[in-house]
Amino acid sequence: MGNKLFGTDGVRGVANVYPMTADFAMKLALACAETVCKNKKRVAIGKDTRISGDMLEAALSAGFTAKGVDVIRLGVLPTPAVTTVTPMLDVDMSVMITASHNPYKDNGIKLIASDGEKFADTVTAELEAKIEANNFSYDEDALGRIHDEHKAIDEYVKLAKSVMKNGANLKGLKIVLDGANGVFANIMPEVYQELGAEVVTLGCSPNGLNINKDCGSMHPQNMMDKVKEVKADLGIAADGDGDRIIVSNDKGEKVPSEQIIAFLAQNMQNEGSLNGRAVVSTVLSNTGLERFVKEELKLPYYSTPVGERHVVAKMKEINGAVGGEESGHVVAFDYCKSGDALIVSLLICQYLLKAHKKMSEIFPLFAMDPFEFVSLRFGSREQVKEVVKLPEILRLVEEQKRLLGDEGRVVIHPSGTEPLVRVWVSGKNADKVKAIHTTLVNAFTKLQQENVA
């Protein structure tokens, strides 16, 4: 039994187009009520700022209450806040309605277990089977209620501020904050101002239609330009649901996520909070990070498949301290079990002030290995799944891996949320990396043109 609808980060699609319809959302709630919500008979629901969130929240609430499950509406809340407060809410599970960094027309549904972790594939596969069977029953005496909970955000903000050690503040720091017109549009500027920072805001006026539009982590250029314009110390851009972060130095230059992960690990080690714990990233992370962690920091390093949940699962397994992906998901595991733009940015700012240096004087911490990366779009996710399994592609990938040997990595990654094949090659020799990447891209481009079904 496998997942047809659930990707690496829940179900996602265009709102009002299957599966992002009210009908599907209600059936998903019914399935969750029968499969998961057997103990507390309570579920929490959060959402981002996109306009379709109201529709999906209403449909999910209808499905849960029709099965006797009470719904706790959290309102607009960051994904990391939902994962953080879920264990405090006495619920069987939580739901986050978001399409993360995607445009407003898209939406998605993330399922979160009672401990704040994402659902296992086996559970989502069981839910899909129930939805497909469509054999739900109802009990006239089993009806749930809907409650609004406004204190969850206060608990989350309290936790976020706890990263500031010994009452530290951010006075003297000038920062550009881009909230992607999403969940952090109000929260992040308020927290930074309360901590004494001088704040310049972008993307902090959500209207339901402008989430991620020309702003946030997917479009950080405005933020980087603003850093130069106002002579800020750094810039931070979140994505629509707040679990992704892009950082700019004082010169308006992007700081790669691998450098941020290394910076956090280095400072946590210096303050004595690591105790030899590991750093975790994915196979798409620059190979220079692994070398820096092992050789310079003398810490264990683990590499996982692509996807934040794989990083988090490994961190949980080995009690890792810091982890993340090149895409901007960065996890400080002692504070949050997912990527978190607010918590990570507060840690960065705190360590920056301690260093008494400019961002441009600190980074890069290590030389990034040469790498080539491109995302190739196909007609559908089903087509992508078939293309990456073609015998000629599998043979070609293995040939190129042998050519690269131990000098780097070759990764072919079918996106879990979009009809994309990501072709990524990294290694010590720039010419070899480019040649291998070109060979692979040419092969996939030919398949694109042939419109392989």
Image (cartoon, grey):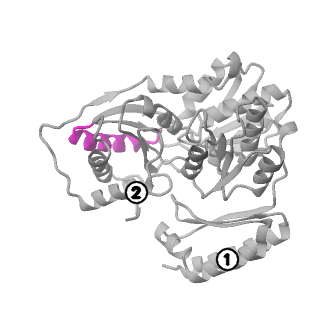
Q: Is residue 107 visible?
A: yes
Q: Is residue 368 left or right of residue 146?
A: right
The residue that appears at 30% across and 41% down in the rendered structure is: 37
The residue that appears at 54% across and 70% down in the rendered structure is: 378
Q: Is residue 442 visible?
A: no
Q: Is residue 430 left or right of residue 301?
A: right
Crowd class of label 2 (few under 14; some 14 to 19; many from 20; radius 10 Å): few
Q: Which residue is mark 2?
A: 122
Q: Secondary structure at mark 2?
A: helix
> Residue 288, image x and y in percent?
79, 54
Q: Quadrant of residue 2?
A: bottom left
Q: What is the magenta range?
A: 49-69
Q: Quadrant of residue 274?
A: top right
Camera-side residue: 367 or 437?
367
> Residue 444, image x and y in percent?
63, 76
Which residue type does callout 1 highlight?
Glu
The label number, if any, that marks residue 27 in the structure image: none
Camera-side residue: 345 or 391?
391
**Disc 1 and disc 2 in contact, CB within 8 angstroms:** no
Which residue type does callout 2 highlight?
Thr
Q: Which residue is mark 1?
A: 398
